[in-house]
Amino acid sequence: MDTEPNISLDQSYHYPPELLEMLTEVIPCLFKSKQGVIDFFRGAGTPTPYLADWQSKVRTDRDSVKKHEIARDVLRQLNEGGDKTLAQRREVIKRVSEFEDFSTCYENDRYKAQGLVAQILKVVNVKDSFTRMNLEREKERKERQAAYTASVEAKQKEAKERATIKDSLYKLFAERDPYKRGKQLEGILNRLFSFAGFLVREAFTLKGDEGQGIIEQIDGAVEIDGILYLVEMKWWNEPIGRQEIAPHLVSVYGRANVGGIFISYSGFSPAAIEDARTGLVQRVFVLTELQEIIQVIDREANLTTFFKEKINRAKSDRNPFYKR
């Protein structure tokens, strides 16, 4: 018999009462002799001590032994064996379910045996279905738990990173060296842009021909909706004027399909804002105060949404310095 039935009992599975009763009834019906019942259990791998007493009784006083007594006692021992006899319990089920040649039965037991085997196969398959459903439910529960745990950990990591950036930004207010403060601001804002999900390129310089030295310095660049924006940052005590904003406008105009973002601690003069507005005819250019970004961090709001709104206002309203 090559066909293996679809039986997959859980590792902790024991014969439930209804299945135990059917096995107790069917196994004696499958064999004409008491020795045949013992050999069936031996073939299923039943430990020798479980069969020793019954083997001795069959040899010495066959008439005092009944097949049902042998089946009931051995099945009880297998059921009480727990995990140690799991393989044997499974093998008993497998062998009974595979039974096809009922010629080993007495004639008056044949139809009973066939009916019981069919019922056992049905019961086992139903039990197995519940086992599989429980396993699936458990799998889904673990997957949901893992997803929830991952979500909580991601939020904790996000909150920790946001707090670190916020703390670093606030520490800049105690830095008296303008150069150090400016370089630190670049790093912190680039970290913030990266945290917000922007593609970031940090500060870079362009050099001219030999003897010209550095001809252009860019504090950084970010990509928003597929468009590259050159970023300039200044922490000055006075508002940024048109002379300070002009080099950045030139850097933006000198490249195809790029925009500009200028971040200032001290705001912008009316003339600088007007120059940026005039420049909107050629390029998207937005002006942002550092305090606005700090407020985004404090509100735990989305920096991407913040800049997208500014960009959209610059395009639609020709307002490079839109503030809520």
Image (cartoon, rainbow, N blue to C red):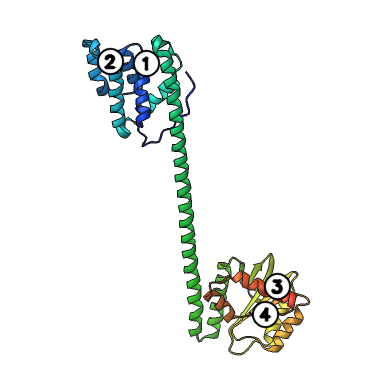
Residue found 39% across the figure and 11% down from its top: 108
Q: Amino acid at mark 3?
A: Asn
Of 301 and 233, the residue lying toward us: 301
- Report, in whole angstroms, how far the alpha carbon at label 3 lies from the one at label 2: 91 Å
**Which marked residue is nearer to the observer: mark 4 or mark 1?**
1
The reply to whether callout 2 and callout 1 are in contact (CB within 8 Å) is no
**Label 1 neighbour load within 10 Å: few <14, some 14-19, many 20+:** many
Residue 322's disc is 4
Task: Find numbered disc 1 in the image and state the secondary structure of the residue it sits on.
Answer: helix
Q: Nearer the viewer, mark 2 or mark 4?
A: 2
Q: Which residue appears farthest toward the right when viewing the image?
A: 281
Q: Is residue 18 above or below residue 139?
A: above
In the image, residue 233 sits, relative to residue 227, either above or below, namely below
Mark sitting on residue 66: 2
Q: Residues within 10 Å of mark 2 (few under 14, many from 20)?
A: some
- Per the image, the residue denoted by label 3 is 312
Closer to the chain start, of discs 2 and 4, is 2
Q: Across the whole image, how many numbered discs are drawn on residues?
A: 4
